Amino acid sequence: MKVIVVGAGVVGTMHAWHAVERGHEVVHIEREAEARGASLRNFGQIWVSGRAGGEELDTALRARELWEGIGARVPELGFRAIGSLTPVRGDLELAVAEAALARPDAAARGYKLLTAEAARQVNPALRGDFQAALFCERDAAVEPRTAQLALRKALLASGKYTFLPNREVRDASGAEGMRNAAVRDDRGEIHTGDAVVLATGAALSGLVREIAGDIPVRKVRLQMMQTDPLGEPLTTSVADADSFRYYPAYKSEALDALNAGQAQDPTAAAHKMQLLMVQRLDGGLTIGDTHEYEHPFAFDTLEDPYEHLVRVVESFLGRPLPRIRRRWAGVYAQCTDTTRVVYRQKVREGVWLVTGPGGRGMTCSPAIAETTADELGW
């Protein structure tokens, strides 16, 4: 079988990976020289801890397993099974962590509630004041800016993979029985195969609208930043209690009490923020993020959210942050029904659209692609 994958972000690259793993030939087409979207502009976290129970958690856990296996074969991914810590302060935040620990799937996530002293033994960089910390053993990390490059290098070595950059696909068509599927690029070239996967990320107009119409997927904008090297290991990723307000795993009566009894910081509330932080292999910290849902998005970045994040991080570290090296904004595609892990639709015979994983994309992409391969009978 020959599979054509459109889009070289992490979702498209993982579809290419599974196709090659199953012995198929892949032609991979990307409109840029390389992917430049949300697949690079994220934390690189394999984030299990906050996922909703059921399909979302099952997908994340399967993806975590796949990431570890792929990471062992492609060391350049920088896969690290580092876990995460969410420090809490006060009885209301502590109660949410305790409620999470009481979930029936808490063991699958690797939840443990640690005292502040025990949390500092796990992550000595956390010298600030906090009462306890929720530990999630199953969380992990890879290097987002280079992951697709590392995977592509391994795919090229297979002899079954062709990468075609700087080509925008303008049309896609197929025929009964998954034969003679084809795409036409903006150079006028036709690429034929047995199946086409459109993994176009947040590019929801143009080709996607022409062949799929208005789909139940929206764009979400975020702001993030990265520091100079910290000068010491941050041995886990770190979140704050605002992540309890954001992630569905933490819904509980205790969370209702937190929301009623402890107002969120005004800047965090205005920008729908949480703290997530992970250390890169070069020692720098990737820190974020905000969430903007209403169009049109701003074209600039705002300083107030960055100042808020600096205050929160420094309160956990008990020390000043290193110099901010980079600031950026990104846009990802999210299903409007946020309980839905991904939007997967056969838009024409032999042509499938896979988009809308939202903030789950980096975490869940290996399992999302595996499911596509299974459903299509690759």
Image: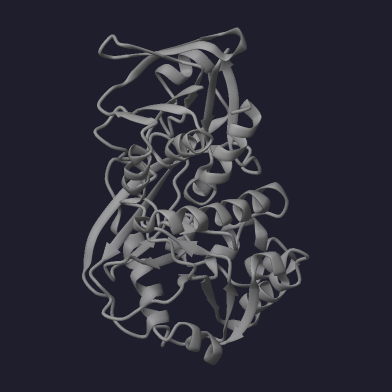
Specify whether 81 is left or right of 51. Answer: left
**Which quarter of the figure has residue 340?**
top right
Q: Nearer the viewer, residue 127 or 149?
A: 149
Residue 293 placed where, x, y %? 47, 42
Relative height, residue 370 to residue 144 (above, below): above
Residue at 59% of width from left, 57% of height from top? 247
Relative height, residue 111 to residue 116 (above, below): above
Q: In this figure, which colouring scheme has been used for the structure?
A: one colour
Q: Nearer the viewer, residue 210 or 291?
A: 210
Q: How many marks?
A: 0
Residue 372 placed where, x, y %? 59, 33
Relative height, residue 358 to residue 317 (above, below): above
Q: Nearer the viewer, residue 52 or 260?
A: 52
Toward the bottom, the furthest residue is 117
Q: Quadrant of the C terminus?
A: top right
Residue 175 placed where, x, y %? 55, 7
Residue at 42% of width from left, 80% of height from top? 316
**Which quarter of the figure has residue 207?**
top left
Relative height, residue 118 to residue 178 (above, below): below
Residue at 42% of width from left, 86% of height from top? 124
Residue at 39% of width from left, 31% of height from top? 160
Q: Nearer the viewer, residue 355 or 77?
A: 77
Residue 61 placed where, x, y %? 62, 56
Specify whether 108 is left or right of 336. Answer: right
Specify whether 356 is left or right of 311. Answer: right
